[in-house]
Amino acid sequence: MKRLMLMIGFVMMLCTAVLGNDYYVSQSGDDGNPGSKDKPFKTIQKAASVMAAGDTCYVGEGRYTESVQVTGSGAKEAPIRFVAQPEGKVTINGMYRIERHWIGYFDYEIWSTAAEKTFQTGTDGKYYSEIYVDGEKMTRVANAKGLREPKQWFMEGTKLVLWPPAGESPEGVAAPYNNPETLHVEGRLVGGGFVLKGAEYVVITDFKFSDATVNFENCSHCTVENCSFSSSKSK
C-alpha cells in the first residue's frame, strides 16, 4: 500500500509538472500582481521572466508595445505557450510613440548651427533602430559630429538626440525649428515583438504583429502559429 501511494504521488507530481501554470496579462494589470486571472500582469515580459516548462501565458485584448525577451525553455510534452486571447484581438506593436519631454541639446565641444536646432530626451531604457517624425523616416548618424542638416538623429548613452524637420518656431524656442513635443515622433524598437534566445519548445499563437517580428537565436522546436505580420512603415 505504501509503495502504491508513493507511485500515485509520483504520477501526480509528473502530471502537475506537465500541466504547468497559467499566467495572465492585461493592459489593466500590474507587474506587481501574481499574474493570476483576477490579478494579471501588465506586460508580457513579466510573464516571460517567470515561466517554465508547461506554463501558458494568456494575453488579453489590446495593443502591447514590447520587446519580449524569452530565454526559458519548455519540453516536448510541456512547451511554454504564449496565447492571444481572444484570437486576433491582441497586437504586438514595434513602434513606440516618444512623448517624453524634449530639451535643447548643446555640445560645447562641437559648436555649430545644429546646436541650437537640436533636441534631446531620455530613452527610458529603450533602444531604437529607426526614428520617424510625422511619418517620415529620419537619418541616423553616429554622433553629434555627424549632424549636418535637419532630419537626423543619434543615440548617446541614455539620450536620444534629434534634429527635427524645419518648421515654425514654437514659443520659447529661438531657432526656426520645431520642438519635437509639437510633432508626432515614433521609434522602431530594436527587437520589437518577441526575441527568443537559446530557447526550446516555445509556442506563440494567435497574435497580430504590427511593425514587430519574432526573432530566433540558437533556438530549436519553437513555433509561431496562426499569427499575422504587417508594417505601417517602409524599412
Image: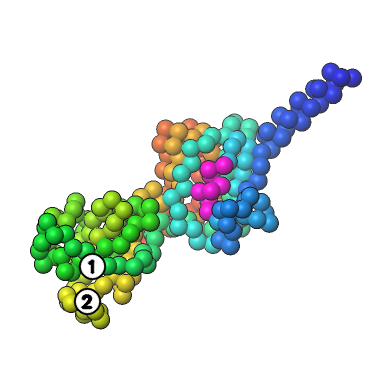
Q: Is residue 111 magenta?
A: no
Numbered disc 2: secondary structure = loop
**Magenta span: chief secondary structure:** helix
Residue at x 14% of width, y 65% of height: 114
Q: Is residue 48 magenta?
A: yes
User: Contact (CB < 8 A) between labels 2 and 1?
Assistant: yes
Q: Is residue 1 visible?
A: yes
Q: Quadrant of the N terminus?
A: top right
Residue 156: numbered disc: none
Q: Quadrant of residue 119?
A: bottom left
Q: Give the amino acid at mark 1.
A: Gly
Residue 104: numbered disc: 1
Numbered disc 1: secondary structure = strand
Residue at x 87% of width, y 19% of height: 2
Q: Quadrant of the C terminus?
A: bottom left
Q: Which residue is disc 2 drawn over?
A: 173
Query: Is residue 96 depicted above or below 224 in this figure?
Result: below
The numbered mark, 2 or 1, whose residue comes first in the sequence reads 1
Query: Is residue 2 depicted above or below 94 in this figure?
Result: above
Nearer to the camera, 112 or 13: 112
Residues packed near mark 2 inside 10 Å, few (<14), some (14 to 19) or many (20 plus): some
Total numbered labels placed on residues in the image: 2
In magenta, the rendered stretch is: 43-50
Across and down, in percent, residue 113 comes to 11, 67
Drawn side of residue 91 relative to residue 85, left or right: left
Drawn side of residue 160 relative to residue 70, left or right: left
Residue at x 54% of width, y 58% of height: 90
Marks 2/1: CA–CA distance: 9 Å
Residues packed near mark 1 inside 10 Å, few (<14), some (14 to 19) or many (20 plus): some
Q: Given the current orientation, which residue lies at the most extreme left position?
A: 112
